[in-house]
Image (cartoon, grey):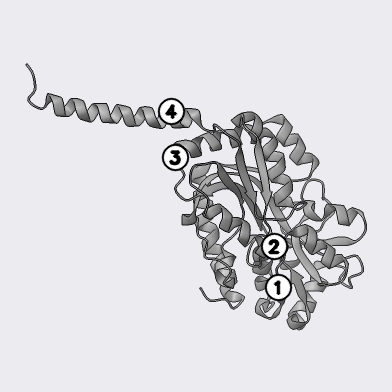
Amino acid sequence: MRSPNGPIVCSVLALLVAALSTSTARAGEFPRRPVTIVVPAAAGGGGDTTTRLLARGLERELGQAVTIVNQGQGGGVVGLTTLVKAAPDGYTVGLLFPYAGYKYTGQATFTHRDFSPIANFNGDAAALVVASGSPFATLKDAFDAMKAAPERYKIHCSGGCGSVWDVPVAAVMLDYGIEVSRLSWIPGQGAATGLQELASGGVHLQTVSLPESAALTQAGLVRPLAVFSPKPVPGFETVPLAGDVVGHPVDGGTWRALAGPAGVPPDVIAVWEAAVRKTVESPEFLAAMKKANFGVKWAGAKDLARLMEDYETGTARVMRALGYAE
């Protein structure tokens, strides 16, 4: 018996099949041309280095050339702005790192809603470093001095302040009783330029990762006071732990991920996510990251989305203590 609604049902089914076929074709066809990764940092820093190591494997997995575009101006705001304004077609993605502090410094209003999370591929602990000639021999020396007269000291953030390294360091300073709002926090265009300023005496301290400061440490121009990790960092086992000073384990640092602008189709995100995962799990990438002393930390799109929301909540506490209003 023929249903009176037969033609309608068939039409609906045809539309569903067509939509599914289009989605599958789009995912199967992507990418059909070279892709771009925007790195909101200057060349030579950790964000640039780790992204370039990742890009080697992504070219193999995606079957297309990957162009890296460095835009570290404004402490990374320029690069992130380029990313959020890009066409949401998956052909322009970017390096994403702790970004919530920009809202409090009036530089930008980025939130997790501005991005399409793809995957996290790197995680490193923050460190506090000084120039080789600094009077501070230990982290306790530095903390005690800043607690006594915070207005005397300048700290380079390595990028936009309220971002990658300074937020976890400031959180520990709060626990130590330092009035973080009275310190001078200096933004920059990346770790490399900040370390040069530190070595030349332009600032007293710098928040950075140990791998980023390794070259100047080996050259005898800077030295780490402590790393904000619950256990020694491989390759830097002699660097003291910040937790030994404050009396409890400390786990603070950065995460680095890929993301697109808001609105990238889920099937395109899936292609990127799979490519990142295969790269992160490859022996070549693992060996390269180990050689460069960078940590590997995987999180897929869904877990990255949760990480971003939790990070925004934690950053709010520190930024309010620094005297910034939302």
* Amino acid type at mark 2: Gly
Mark 2 to mark 1 CA distance (whole Å):
11 Å
- Indicate which disc, 4 or 2, sits on the residue closer to the N terminus: 4
Asked whether, in this view, residue 241 is left or right of residue 31, the answer is: right
Residue assigned mark 1:
185
Q: Residue at x 78, y 82 (%)?
A: 152
Question: Which image quadrant is residue 31 in?
Answer: top right
In the structure shown, which secondary structural element does the residue marked by tag 2 occupy?
loop
- Indicate which disc, 1 or 3, sits on the residue closer to the N terminus: 1
Q: Residue at x 74, y 46 (%)?
A: 49
Question: Which image quadrant is residue 59 in?
Answer: top right
- Indicate which disc, 4 or 3, sits on the residue closer to the N terminus: 4
Residue assigned mark 4:
25
Mark 2 vs mark 1: give the one in front.
2
In the structure shown, which secondary structural element does the residue marked by tag 3 occupy?
helix
* Amino acid type at mark 1: Trp
In the foreground, 301 or 317 = 301
Q: Is residue 324 visible?
A: yes
Residue assigned mark 2:
159
Asked whether, in this view, residue 95 is left or right of residue 145, the answer is: left
* Amino acid type at mark 4: Ala
